[in-house]
Every structure is written in structure tokens, then in C-alpha cells.
Image: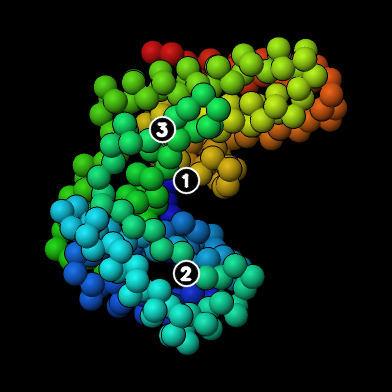
Amino acid sequence: MYVFSPAYPTPQHEEAARHATEFFAQQPGVNAVLLACSCARGKATPDSCLDLAVLLDASEAAAQRSKIEAAWSQVYADDPVYAALLGVGKYSHVDISFSSGQFVPDNYRHGWTLGPDFFELDIGNTFAYTIPLWQREDRFDQLQARWLPYYSDKLREERLAMVRKYCLNNLHHIPPYVDRGLYFQAFRRLYDAFGEFLQALFIARRTYPIAYDKWVREQIVDILQLPALYPQLVAMLEVHHLESDELKDKAAALEHLLETYAPAE
């Protein structure tokens, strides 16, 4: 079982988290303030941003968000605590995301050339990989219980079939693109299919991902417990001769992994 714990990389990160939490806790319509991303999992460095997720009351989310964002922008610009954080590292700012806790699959577009959508990412980075810093009553706990350990089997089957469809479409476009000399487009298709493979892999295992382009080793080895798969994924994007049939071979290899680790149900 994957276990994580929060850790701030610097005192400035911790102080900024405390100040921001106090600010959002005073705003009407805010149900919870969550420590997210690398700080929540104890993976942050001084260059890391401080990621906070603000859970808004669903009935007031649209009306309150713009007001809260405007007030936050003013506080963030004036408070020396945040200026001190900015001086710690190259990207050490506060990154705020807002959520109503309502996730509707139809609101997430998964197009033919867009790569993986963010449905599972948004749920996981709101409820699976966060630490509550403050909450009003128990709405966060109720929503977390609704989405964890995973969404319904019916939705999972639908989502897996959909993601596989788009992944295979990208992979099957690669050989004709290579034959036409469109090597950069073929590589783009391979990269998008790679992200969709990861999305399908997590859906197949009823596990929420963290990201499709970061922390891949942590997710494959530590969360999914598939250490033998990780080197194969690294090799998948190691292209030595772009203008060759190598991309065809990569596409075939990734399709084999898809059928092995996330087959149709």
C-alpha cells in the first residue's frame, strides 16, 4: 500500500502554507484547504511551488470563486511571507487550484489528438494525494468517501474502453505517418499514446494517478508496484533515429504493453 506524508522543503514554504490557510479559512463558501502535490507527499525541494487546493461549496462555487481569487491576488501581492517564499527557489510560489468537488466525466474532453484527459488526475489530486490543512465541518470527508477507493465499476469499464480507443487510434496513425516522412507528428502521436497508456493502466488497476508526465517512476514502482514495467516505459521514448522505422517499432511495443497491462474488458 502506498503511504505518503507531508513535508515542507523550507520554513518559508511552511509559513506560506499557514498564512494561505488562514486566509482561505476566513472566506465564505470555502469548505476545506488541502496541501497538494509534492509537498503533500514529502517530495518537494526548495525550488518547488507550494500547491494548495481550495474546496468550495458546490452551491456557491461559481459566485464565490471570482471574489476569492481577487482578494487572494491582493493579499498575495502585499504579504511579505509570500515574497520570502518567492526568494527561496526558482519556482517557489504559491499555486492555488479551486474545486467544487464535483467531477463529471462528460465535462472532460478527450479528443483524437489531445492526449489523456484530466478526469482521474483531478480526482486523485483532490482526494487521494492531499492532506487537509483546514476544513469546515465534514464535506471534504464525505466527498473523499464518495470517490475513494475508486469510482463505480460501470464508469470504470466505460472510461477504460474510451481511453483504449484513443490510445490505439494514436498508435495506429504512427506507421502511415512514418511512411509519409511525418516523423515529428508520428513522435507526437507516440507521446500522446504514452500518456493514454498510463491513463488506461491506472484505470485498469482502479488507482488514481498523480500525473502522466511527472513522477512516473514513483507511480509505476511505488504506487502500482510494477517495477519491471518502468524500464520498458523509459525505453519507449528513447528514440535514437527519428527519421526511421524506429517509431513503428515503438508503436507496436506500446500496443503490446496496452494489451498486456490494460486489456479490453
Marks 2 and 3 close (CB-CB < 8 Å): no
Marks 3 and 1 close (CB-CB < 8 Å): no
**Total marks in image:** 3
Marks 2 and 1 close (CB-CB < 8 Å): no
Q: Which residue is mark 3?
A: 109
147 vs 203, left or right, is: left
- SS type, badge 3: loop
Q: Earlier in the sequence, mark 2 or mark 3?
A: 2
Q: Where in the figure is residue 189, as x and y percent of width and height?
A: 64, 26
Q: Where in the figure is residue 111, as x and y percent of width and height?
A: 48, 27
Mark number for residue 94?
2
- Work out whether residue 133 can be spotted: no
- Work out whether residue 98 can be spotted: yes
Q: Residue at x 14, y 63 (%)?
A: 137
- SS type, badge 1: loop
- SS type, badge 2: strand
Q: Which residue is mark 1?
A: 210
Give the label, 2 or 3, closer to the camera: 3
Q: Residue at x 23, y 63 (%)?
A: 64
